[in-house]
Image: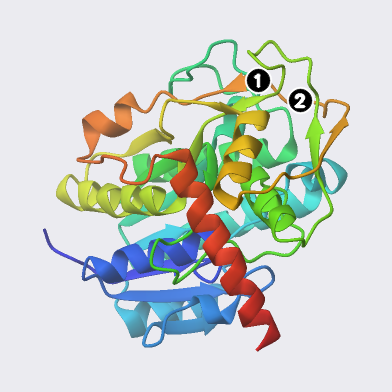
Amino acid sequence: MMKVPVLVTGGAGYIGSHAVLALLDAGWAVAVIDNLTTGFRFAVPDGVAFYQGDIEDEVLLARIFAEQQTRAIMHFAGSIVVPESVENPLKYYHNNTAKSRALIAAAVAAGVPHFIFSSTAATYGIPEVSPVTEDVPRRPINPYGWSKLMTEQMLNDTAAAHPFNYCALRYFNVAGADPQGRSGQSTAGATHLIKVAVEAALGKRGSVSVFGTDYATPDGTGVRDYIHVSDLAAAHVLALEALIAEPARSLTMNCGYGRGFSVFEVLDAVDRVTNRKIERVIEGRRAGDPDSLISDPSRLKSTLPWEPRHADLEEIVTHALAWERKLSDLRSA
C-alpha cells in the first residue's frame, strides 16, 4: 500500500490526536493544522509538522499542501457540543459546514484526492430502529447533526464532479484514551459520560448527573454504543488505505461495536475499576435523547479489515482513568 502525506485537521484535539498517533504508528507522513480553540499543543507529537491556523484560511491551506505534498486529508476540526449547537446554531453552521466547504474547495484546487470525514450518528436523529444501519433515514434533530450531514452531502457532490473520493465515518459514543498514555480527552467541561465519570471518580466533580431513568431500556437509563478512541483511529487509517486502493469509490460507514451499555452500567464499570462509588444525581430527561442508540458496524467490518482491540468496557474506563490522572500532572507541571 502506497503511503501518502496526510494532513490532519483538528489534530491537536481528542480524536484527531489519536488519528495522528495511528498514522505515525503505521508509518505515514503526517502534518497537523489546528487553531487550538479546543485542541492542545502538547497533544501533537514531537517531529510532526504543526500549523496553528484555521481551515477556512485557503492561503494557509495552499501553502501547507505545497510544503507537505499533501495527498490526503483527515478532517476532525469542528464543534461538537449538541446543546451548544441548539443555542448557537450559526456557530455550528460556520465551524462545521462553511469551514468544511472552504477545506474541500482548497483540496480540490490543490488536487488532493482523498478525504476522510469525521461524521456522527447525530445525522440519524432519533432512528426508529436499533441497531442502526447506514441506510436508515437521516433526520437530524439539532444543528450539530445537520451541520455534519450537510458536509457529507458536499463531499458526495464533490466526488461526483472531481477526481476526489471520501469516506464519512459516523461515530457513535467515543471514549477511552491511548493505551500507551500518549493522548486522551483533555477538554475542560467535557460532556461525554465516561470522561465525566472518571473526573468524578478522581474528585474533579462532586457527582454525575443521570438524565432520565424512565427510558424503555432494562434499567431505565439510556443505552449507547461506546467505541474506544484507538479502535476508531485505526478505522480511519484502514479507510484511507481503501480510498487509495480504489480512487473511484467513496464510503460511508458507522463506527461502533454494535453493543450498548446503559448509563448505570457505565457508572457501575467506573465504580468497579476505581473501587469507589460515584455519587449519582437523577435529573430529568434531555430533549432529543433516544432510549437506545446502537450501531450496526457490519459495513465497516465487511469493507475494511477492522477488528476492535479494546472493546471491553472496563478497559475503556481504565484507559480513560489513566489519562485523567496524567492530565492532572500535565496541568500542574
Q: By what rule are the colours in the image chosen? A: rainbow
Amino acid at the residue labelled 2:
Gly
Residue at point 31%, 27% (across, down)? 299
Is 25 rendered above or below residue 218?
A: below
Residue at point 31%, 24% (across, down)? 298
Graded by Cα atoms within 10 Å as few (under 14), some (14 to 19) or many (20 or more), the crowding at tag 1 reads many
Is 218 rendered above or below residue 211?
A: above
Question: Can you tell which mark lies on residue 112?
Answer: none
- The residue pinned by badge 2 equals 288
Instruction: Give percent across and percent down for residue 131.
Output: 47, 18
For the residues labelled 1 and 2, say whether their Cβ atoms are less than 8 Å apart. Answer: yes
Amino acid at the residue labelled 1:
Ile
- The residue pinned by badge 1 equals 126
- Pointer 1 or 2: first along the chain: 1
Q: Secondary structure under badge 1?
A: loop
Q: CA distance from mark 1 to mark 2?
A: 7 Å
Is 107 rendered above or below residue 197?
A: below
Q: Is residue 51 left or right of residue 40?
A: left
Q: Is residue 331 left or right of residue 4?
A: right
